[in-house]
Amino acid sequence: MKLICIICPMGCELKIKQEESIKITGHLCPRGKQYALDEITDPKRVYTGNIRLQGGELPVISYKTSTMRKADLDHLKQVSGSLKLSAPIRLGDILYQDDKMTITATRTIERT
Amino acid sequence: MKRRLVIIGGGPAGLSAALEANRLGIDDILVVEREADLGGILNQCIHSGFGIHEFGEELTGPEYAARFIEEIKQAPIEIWTSASVVALRPNKQLTVLRHAELIELEAEAVILAMGCRERTAGAISLLGERPSGMYLAGAAQKMINLEGLKLGKTALIYGSGDIGLIMARRLSLEGVEVKGVVEINPVSSGLQRNIAQCLNDFDIPLFLNTRIKQVLGREHLEGVIIEDLVTAEERLIECDMLLLSVGLIPENDLVQSFLPIDGSGKIVVDEDRESLQTGFFACGNVLHVHDIVDDVSEEARLAARGAKHYLVGLTKTERYKVIQGQEVLSLIPQRYVGHSLFEVYLRSKKSLRKATIQLFQGDTLILEKKVPILIPSQLYRLKIPEGIKLEGDITVEIKP
Ligand SMILES: Cc1cc2nc3c(=O)[nH]c(=O)nc-3n(C[C@H](O)[C@H](O)[C@H](O)COP(=O)(O)OP(=O)(O)OC[C@H]3O[C@@H](n4cnc5c(N)ncnc54)[C@H](O)[C@@H]3O)c2cc1C
Ligand code: SF4
């Protein structure tokens, strides 16, 4: 199986052989190997997006998640669509946290 | 009003140039930014992928910008936001529109950092009416990410560069059904990782060698007919939104009338990013479109150093040409002085595996570099190592 490593912009092409044991080649650094292992067992991602916000200079606040399971994406969509937030929010503020993910603000939005 | 150094544009290029200029001891620096916020295009790039070289970690666009903005607020640098430079003259006089008032400025040195803008739909030919629902990808990115707008339910994207790919993922996460990304070329010009994480992750098809033939719908977009250029097969894709991501062009209108521009539309500069009109410097996307913002910040520091040399009165000896040889699509700088080490940034015309980059002085081969892969969409940086003494015009060539 072939995969493109998405951990950094090098975008190494990883080859995965699954015989008695798993063999990974093509990575330029160890993070690529871990990525490939995760991809075949339980893929992980960092997601970014927007959440609606009341009373701010902008109607939305941008966020990023902690590294989370791709399988929990629907949970993220559900949470980010239902959070009630209001300004001000500071860059780095934790907007939501549970055992699956942490959502952090990636900019500052002042109150209008 | 007089100023030592005026920087036009407060995006990553302008911010980094201003900080470096301040660090080098230039006083009386003014940054003029058209928008209400500093940060340029980074404000709307809420995805992550910025700062790996500059900060050793992957940041989102607004986070990357914030690092520079924090620092600039602490520095003795004057910032005008919601202020546009509307005219710039060869004698370094500028007209700025600020709070509905026109202000005349006189600068000793000017750094251009105005970024780029999107090629419009007019640049490509499409049959059909111009119904609503068609957007430039970057404009749509701004509406969705900064204004929180919903633009449609089903989308098709034209152009598979990084902006197109990033928008495909963005729309999917917003609940829009993305029916595909259409690319006229046989390969995507985006990063491999973006094809993996933006398309494959969301099962979005990539139609290569395909063009958009016709847009359907009178008032609002109803669908698009695409044509496979190899098989001539046509198919209808129903969608209420079409994003066009067909390229970026440097926003250099302010200086086009008096600064020499090369055959690919770039301001001609030397290794200090100084144009052929002394005292005018350019960096970031206004000079050439960068893939990675870290390179923009780095290039801006070169321009700031150049401005410092100019302001303390160092004059340059002759400037030699860096000639674009075969298989080279474009390069920067197009001139060099040779007073310090420098790099030639280049793009190849074709995608090549195992190519050799050669640097000639006259007919003599001076430097040869083997590279495993060259892609037009990725900038290659050719370092000219210490110990190589260049003089006279040089040519850079790519041997497949
Ligand atoms: C959609 C998209 C995705 C990207 N993704 C990545 C990524 O994942 N990783 C990465 O490293 N890089 C990425 N980049 C590239 C990076 O963001 C750019 O290369 C970088 O922002 C360019 O910086 P700049 O300062 O040259 O231009 P800009 O950010 O465009 O800033 C130019 C500024 O100048 C101002 N200006 C223009 N004209 C005037 C005037 N006449 N008067 C006053 N002000 C003026 C503008 O308002 C603007 O604020 C992406 C770019 C885009 C568009
Ligand atoms: S393997 Fe390492 S170098 Fe290659 S893309 Fe992954 S993280 Fe980057």
Image (cartoon, helix red, strand yellow):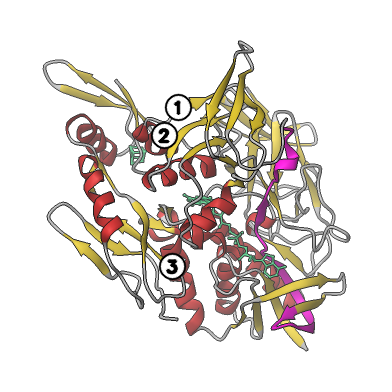
Q: Residue at x 16, y 15 (%)?
A: A19
Q: Position of residue B341 (x, y in %)?
A: 62, 54
**Circle 1 — which element?**
loop
Give the Cα separation between the discs numbered 3 and 2. Answer: 28 Å
For label 3, being within 8 Å of ligand 1 is answered no
**Circle 3 — which element?**
loop
* Amino acid type assigned to the residue bearing label 1 in the image: Pro
Q: Which residues are magenta?
A: B97-126
Say which residue label 1 marks. Answer: B205
Say which residue label 2 marks. Answer: B199
Say which residue label 3 marks. Answer: A59
Residue B177 image-quadrant placement: top left
* Amino acid type assigned to the residue bearing label 2 in the image: Leu
For label 1, being within 8 Å of ligand 1 is answered no
Name the side, left or right, on which A59 lies relative to A95: right
Give the Cα separation between the discs numbered 1 and 3. Answer: 32 Å
Q: Residue at x 79, y 59 (%)?
A: B253
Q: Position of residue B236 (x, y in %)?
A: 56, 23
